[in-house]
Image (cartoon, rainbow, N blue to C red):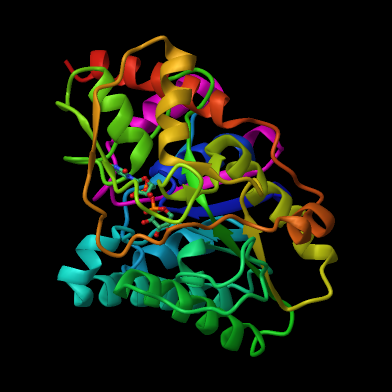
Amino acid sequence: MDDKKYIIVTGGAGYIGSHTVVALRENGFYPIIIDDFRNANRDIIQRLEETLKEEVIHFSISCQEKSRLSGIFSQFPIYGVIHFAAYKAVGESVKNPLKYFDNNFSSLITMLELVREYEVKHFVFSSSCTVYGDPDEIPVTEDSPVSYNSPYGFTKKVNEEMIEQFISSVPDTKAVALRYFNPIGAHASGTIGEEPEGIPNNLLPYITQTAIGLREELTVYGDDYNTEDGTCIRDYIHVVDLAEAHVAALKYLPKSKEHMSTFNVGTGKGTSVMEMVHFFQEVTGKHLKYHIGDRRDGDIPKIYADTNKANDLLGWKTKLTVQDAIRSSWKFQEFISDYRK
Ligand code: WQD
């Protein structure tokens, strides 16, 4: 009897997924990556294997291909599923909502069907602070009002509700939704990190690509917000700490008395765009070209997490700083620019 704790990691070749694969393996779990590489480079597998110094189990399958996925669930005794695979670009979701509804809803439904059929006991869902919309009160707790301001945010909110309703129908299965704040940073080796396709939407990848010469100049989207320096405030969490939160969730689930629980995964601290620009220059010693531009549609002025629930119940807290994240992201940018030449 194979008593290894196999964990299906959908989207395991992606940015957060790949770091979670490393954290799982380092904590004695056996990740099985399910990813069709529509939004990841295939060479991530080799880089993961070099980091872990062993083979990584992976299958190139979409989360909508149920019969092929069934083959994996019948081949391995699955201890848990971590479901990352989803589209995640807010702007694109506004232009093409059906693409988001199709993928983000049907992938979750397929995974939940497999959870039911193969009696998988533990399910971890990748959610987002986007479900808080533009909050009236900060920091946000898990009980803060939930809303959405994009089709992407709508899919995350509805996905959480789908899991909640589904999970009551499978008494032996428990679920956790992790609401990520703003993940940044890279693995300390500098060989695994965030590699956006095309022009980055997110702040730190835009900064590192500018500093390495791939982009002309950073535009700071507005400095007339009602914040101390006028730029927007976010809760930037190191992706390695975020990956650890998934391990903590898997360890918590068997002990949990709740069928489904939700946790904020952030640092509890806010950092402004201009602070990020200054930290980047301090940490790397690189000059960053930037100018102040107009506000970006849909941006909220300020959000950060109340992390007490995750700290207390998951026994998890962040260990790394924004400066650590900037340092590792820059190391990864230097590595990947060279690697792609
Ligand atoms: C951060 C700040 C920008 C780029 C994203 C997702 C959201 C959720 C959290 C997933 C903002 C400013 C950015 C640039 C800038 N994740 N900025 N110039 O908007 O908080 O949200 O992460 O679920 O759904 O969209 O992150 O990195 O895009 O922006 O000034 O070129 O940086 O205005 O204040 P955001 P971001």
Q: Is residue 87 above or below residue 95?
A: above
Q: Is residue 238 above or below residue 224?
A: above
Residue 255 magenta-highlighted = no
Q: Look at the image and tell me in which quarter the C terminus lies.
A: top left
Please name whichever residue, 192 or 123, is drawn nearer the observer in this view of the structure: 192
Q: Is residue 21 above or below residue 162?
A: above
Residue at image coords 52%, 28%: 325
Q: Residue furthest top?
A: 285
Residue at image coords 44%, 47%: 12
Which residues lie in the magenta part? 25-54
Please name whichever residue, 154 or 32, is drawn nearer the observer in this view of the structure: 154
Please name whichever residue, 304 or 24, is drawn nearer the observer in this view of the structure: 304
Please name whichever residue, 76 or 269, is drawn nearer the observer in this view of the structure: 269
Residue 31 magenta-highlighted = yes
Residue 67 placement (x, y as % from top left)? 36, 70
Residue 141 placement (x, y as % from top left)? 67, 67
Q: Is residue 76 above or below residue 195?
A: below
Residue at image coords 56%, 34%: 22
Residue 322 placement (x, y as % from top left)? 56, 31
Q: Quadrant of residue 29?
A: top right
Residue at image coords 32%, 15%: 334
Q: Quadrant of residue 65?
A: bottom left
Residue 24 placement (x, y as % from top left)? 63, 41
Can the viewer see residue 162? yes
